[in-house]
């Protein structure tokens, strides 16, 4: 806390601030404050004093700004709207006014400010000028914005998951039922055609139709399960992961295994969905990038911190490059882990496989 003024250095011999005359003490206080711009205006709005906090926040030295009109600190829009003058009028009329909004620094950059203007009167009530205290709230506003953005992203994710669930149900229940009915009709037709030798070639064609319907039903089941595995809602995460890993092994011929401790961990729907989607994305990456022979998924939930590790023996990757523009897989994993208040690391280098290591507080998974 450097107090640098001629006034205070003359008092350098004082042992403590209580030895300093009270008016000098106020001066020292204002000079010591770094986090607030504290300055005075004359009744016309010209700057008459300037503390180091003001210099730090707004960028002007006292020499540059004293005597200048304070409307400099406002945006062109605010100036055009007559805001600076109105603030002084209000402060003069009612004693004080407070505002939050954009202000402009010396270099033209903007910051989000909380500004309090107080009118200063002499003993007879005549207006001497104004005291202004300005705080830079940009960081706080950024934090609030980030919080808001992450809330929105959680909502979007939940909405998307619900929508996928709905589409998966419709595909399965509605379209699935109709396909089953169609298959039965064609089977009946085939049986009828088979009874008459003259129509035998038609019977072969209807048989072909049946095969096509079977393919369609299988595609439909696969699409619905990719959208939202029914097992996740009906039997829980352990069953859904088993299904995922089995399906993955079949599709890509990469040996995948799941190890759960305990075997049937209990999670809330949000957490179970998040963990499932993380593993699903990790496996998609293994299929796409790893050229691996095996991948192992370990989920250990026997303490206050649960850990999820997904580890493959593939080609690995150098992780020091920034992620590609359209790569959202690892970013999505990070976001889901963050929503569960956990931490994630990606561990890899060329030739050493790829590992995702996640820790999440158990109480975030209920
Ligand atoms: N299991 C893995 N093995 C090797 N490289 C991987 C693996 N997982 C991810 N990567 C690398 O990390 C990058 C980013 O992954 P991701 O964010 O999922 O984006 P995308 O899969 O769309 O490329 C990939 O492009 C790939 O280079
Ligand atoms: Mg990916």
Image (tube, rainbow, N blue to C red):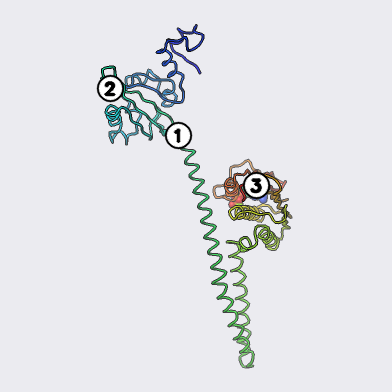
In-front residue for pair 178/239: 239
In-front residue for pair 166/278: 166
Circle 1 sits on which residue? 138
Cα distance between the residues tagged 1 and 3: 34 Å
Q: Position of residue 193 (x, y in %)?
A: 61, 89
Q: Nearer the viewer, mark 2 or mark 1?
A: 2
In the image, residue 250 sits, relative to residue 210, either above or below, namely above
| First in residue order: circle 1 vs circle 3 | 1
Instruction: Mark 3: give few (<14), some (14-19) or many (20+) Cα within 10 Å.
Output: some
Q: Secondary structure at mark 1?
A: helix
Q: Which mark is residue 362?
A: 3
| Displayed quadrant of residue 138 | top left
Cα distance between the residues tagged 2 and 1: 29 Å
- Do the CB atoms of the residues marked 2 and 1 lie less than 8 Å apart? no
Q: Is residue 116 left or right of residue 199?
A: left
Dot 2 beta carbon under 8 Å from ligand 1: no
Q: Position of residue 181 (x, y in %)?
A: 57, 79
Circle 2 sits on which residue? 43
Q: Position of residue 177 (x, y in %)?
A: 57, 74
Cα distance between the residues tagged 3 and 2: 61 Å
| First in residue order: circle 2 vs circle 1 | 2
């Amino acid at each position: 806390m450097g107090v640098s003024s001629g006034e205070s250095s003359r008092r350098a011999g004082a042992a403590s601030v209580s030895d300093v005359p009270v008016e000098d003490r106020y001066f020292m206080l204002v000079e010591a404050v770094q986090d607030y711009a504290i300055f005075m205006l004359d009744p016309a709005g010209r700057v008459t004093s300037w503390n180091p906090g003001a210099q730090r926040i707004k960028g002007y030295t006292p020499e540059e700004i004293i005597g200048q009109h304070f409307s400099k600190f406002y945006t062109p829009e605010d100036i055009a709207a007559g805001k600076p003058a109105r603030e002084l009028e209000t402060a003069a009329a009612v004693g004080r006014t407070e505002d939050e909004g954009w202000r402009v620094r010396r270099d033209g950059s903007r910051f989000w400010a909380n500004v309090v203007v107080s009118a200063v009167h002499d003993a007879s009530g005549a207006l001497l000028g104004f005291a202004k205290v300005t705080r830079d709230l940009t960081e706080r506003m950024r934090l609030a914005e980030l919080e808001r953005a992450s809330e929105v992203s959680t909502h979007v994710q939940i909405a998307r998951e619900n929508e996928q669930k709905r589409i998966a149900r419709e595909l399965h229940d509605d379209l699935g039922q109709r396909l089953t009915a169609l298959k039965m009709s064609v089977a009946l037709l085939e049986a009828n055609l088979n009874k008459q030798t003259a129509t035998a070639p038609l019977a072969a064609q209807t048989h072909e139709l049946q095969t096509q319907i079977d393919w369609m039903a299988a595609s439909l089941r696969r699409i619905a399960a990719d959208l939202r595995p029914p097992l996740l809602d009906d039997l829980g995460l352990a069953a859904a992961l088993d299904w995922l890993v089995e399906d993955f092994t079949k599709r890509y011929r990469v040996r995948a295994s799941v190890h759960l401790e305990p075997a049937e961990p209990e999670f809330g729907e949000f957490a179970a969905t998040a963990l499932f989607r993380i593993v699903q994305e990790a496996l998609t990456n293994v299929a796409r990038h790893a050229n691996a022979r095996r991948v192992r998924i370990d989920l250990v939930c026997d303490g206050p911190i649960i850990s999820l590790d997904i580890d493959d023996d593939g080609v690995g990757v150098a992780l020091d490059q920034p992620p590609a523009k359209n790569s959202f897989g690892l970013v999505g994993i990070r976001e889901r882990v963050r929503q569960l208040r956990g931490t994630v690391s990606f561990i890899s280098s060329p030739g050493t496989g790829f590992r995702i290591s996640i820790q999440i507080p158990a109480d975030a998974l209920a």
